[in-house]
Amino acid sequence: MNEQNPERGRVSLDDLLKANKAQFDKIFADQMQASGLLSVDHRPATADDRASASVASTQSADNVTAQLNAQYGSGWSSEILEHSAERGGVSVLVKLTVGDVSKMQFGTARANGDKGKALQRATDDALAKCYAMLANGEPATEATASAQRPRQALHPADVAQQPAPVGDKLDGVTLDLIENALRNARHEMDAVLFRSAMSPVIREQHDEFPMITDPKGRMIVGQFGSYVPAMLKTQNFDLEPGDVILQSDPFQCGGAISHINDWLILVPVFFHGNLVGFTSMFGHMMDVGGPVPGSMPTAATSIFGEGLRIPPIKLYEGGVLNRAALDLIMNNTRTPEMNYSDLMAILAGCRAGEKRVIELCERFGGNIYADACDALLERTERAMRQLIVANLPTEPQSFEDYVDSDGCGNGPFKMKLTVWREGEHAYFDWTGTADQAPGPINFYLHEGMFKMFIGVYMIMVFDPQILFNDGFYDLIHVTLPKGSLVHPDFPASLGCRTHTLSRQFDVMGGALSHNAPELATAAGYGSSPHFLFSGTDLDGRDFQLMEILYGGIPGRPIGDGMDGHSWWPLFENIPTEYLETYYPMVIESYGSIKDTGGAGLHRGGNGIEKIYRLLAEGDVSIHDDRDVSQPWGILGGKPGAVSKKFLIRKDGEKTPLPAKIDNVRVRPGDRIVFCTAGGGGWGDPLERDPIWVRNDVARKLVSIELAHSDYGVVLEGAEIVVDHRASQDLREGMRRNRKALPMFDFGDRRGSK
């Protein structure tokens, strides 16, 4: 990097994408086909294909492909069922299908330092053997494939081609095998996406959510709850193999996704011509148009001011891409190459899930697979019945908290939830919640989504071993007042809805704590802090960044809250090295803010401070909340600290920034200081072990002053030694003089600046 101009020579992610888009398309298509994730019609490779491919086709591939095309036209396909690399060689198992006939054979090749070319040669070898078998009329049996099999074992799913015999019944072992296979398939969908996506918000932060459902659209495994019935309700699609549905409009899918930056892919899964389920993922796109880079304007007063809305459409129909629709969509984003890459990566993830479901049906039979899906739903329902009876009150209990502002000068906005149970059924009523906001904090809450949030919360708090799925939906009854903050009327703006979404968990925790306070948590940072930076660097290249930051997780019955952690457990931060490599900035500091977690027997997690030094002129947008209302403590725990933001000009002038603001003009050398809120404490701080307090001070999580004032611990010397006698005396005096500990400590509702 040039020391005079550190921005010179910096690699631009957009430039990389633009320069390599043709090659990316070819590599993506080749990898998808080679992995068996796409079923495509073959054709002879063209000169353009070979020129744009990272690995040119070999002569043998041309020969066998030409022979197959000459004899069968487009009526053949192939896929790799298995591959491995060991001892300098590559081995693959390939299936060639012509009409209703399939042949399988192994192929091998020496790597000679290039495993990519070796994989191609091994595939050509196997394909040629399959073609020879087909030409000679040999039967396609498992024994034939095994006759020339390399040393490694073949998974039963790769060779079981027929359904289980009619009358076979599901047993416990088979159910466990299918359950864990689906769990793994769900995580494989993630892995495929993370390796293929190009935007930092998906590739690094994992702002995406996968799902596998049964034919009715009920989620069997996933993270965000089933939305398929609501999504398909608005349009009655005739589904067939090869179809792919895309959509991004919350109001046209019943809140299946909650703002238009989330692009959702839905793939129907067919086995022997029958629909056996769906695979689906949605991910946050860097930009979808609108007046502000990043497409989440804090001043938007309707969804029309936030960007492009995509109704449910067939992106692929029968395997054929709707190019006109794709071109129209990509023409309405500032980051078309990045969005395209992420969209295809999401599709690849769905295809990976589709492949695993089909393998399960091949191995166990379609009927057994369907029975297993039903059994997994029933298992979760039985577990949830027990959780409801054990942890929900029979008398209605209410709790209130507030979203501080809507970005348009309005607020606070009350969120009120009333919870009770009747027998084994749970009721969650949002009556009393504020009317929808003029600004974009509205959360168009799909009822099924909220049921999943309830399930996720209760499962994670009370029994984390339970499988997330839709089995318990019939036990949950939800009231979402129309026109309210949690169910706004069209065309309400939705871009900043994650502040309401995250505050929802605080409210839910407060409502559930009445019946079992010793099992409840305090409030977390209750927001979704976003930092957006866009502009043109010193080399004249456009750039755009969105980063999600994290805050303090609340103190819990089992221990302290985590410092600077995401409220979505699978989210991660963007590495500093990534940010400084691809964007004109230097991260001057990134760490926990001392004393921001509420004191307690179990300390609330601290918020984080991140200081960005910007190296190019551009515009900054900030989305956050909890800058007024403190994250409350519980059972005597103290509240956490509020969030703060500052702009420090190159000349040292320091200006406070509101929690929600767009288009803050910045210049090289300016700094943004982003401080997130902490989490509330759990339990009496005077009951915390003085050694724990001492260790917090040594780790710079708690100050000596706060250790004295909130925990009653006296520390001495450079080595930070506990004076146990003085601490005992101090604590006894504090207990005598304080008021009775409150169930909830909301702190200063006005907050502090």
Image: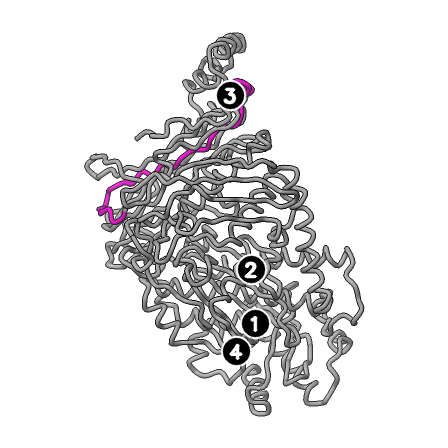
**Quick one: SS at disc 3?**
helix
Please say whether residue 686 is one of the residues in the magenta stretch.
Answer: yes
Disc 3 residue type (three-letter) = Pro
Badge nearest the viewer, 4 or 1: 4
Query: What residue do we see at 65% from left, 37% from top?
Result: 390
Q: Which residues are magenta?
A: 662-691
Please say whether residue 48 is one of the residues in the magenta stretch.
Answer: no
Which residue extends farthest bottom? 71
Mark-to-mark CA distance, 3 and 1? 59 Å
Question: Looking at the rendered structure, which numbered label has been put on residue 318?
Answer: 4
Mark-to-mark CA distance, 3 and 4? 63 Å
- Where residue 418 appears, as percent x and y from the top left, is 51, 39
Q: State the residue position of label 3.
A: 685
Disc 1 residue type (three-letter) = Ala
Q: Earlier in the sequence, mark 1 or mark 2?
A: 1
Q: Earlier in the sequence, mark 3 or mark 4?
A: 4
Q: Earlier in the sequence, mark 4 or mark 1?
A: 1
Q: Is 627 rendered above or below residue 105?
A: above
Mark 3 in CB contact with mark 4 (< 8 angstroms): no
Question: Looking at the rendered structure, which numbered label has been put on residue 189?
Answer: 2
Q: Earlier in the sequence, mark 3 or mark 1?
A: 1
Front-most of residues 124 and 485 = 485
Q: Is 351 rendered above or below residue 424?
A: below
Mark-to-mark CA distance, 2 and 3? 44 Å
Query: What residue do we see at 47% from left, 44% from top?
Result: 430
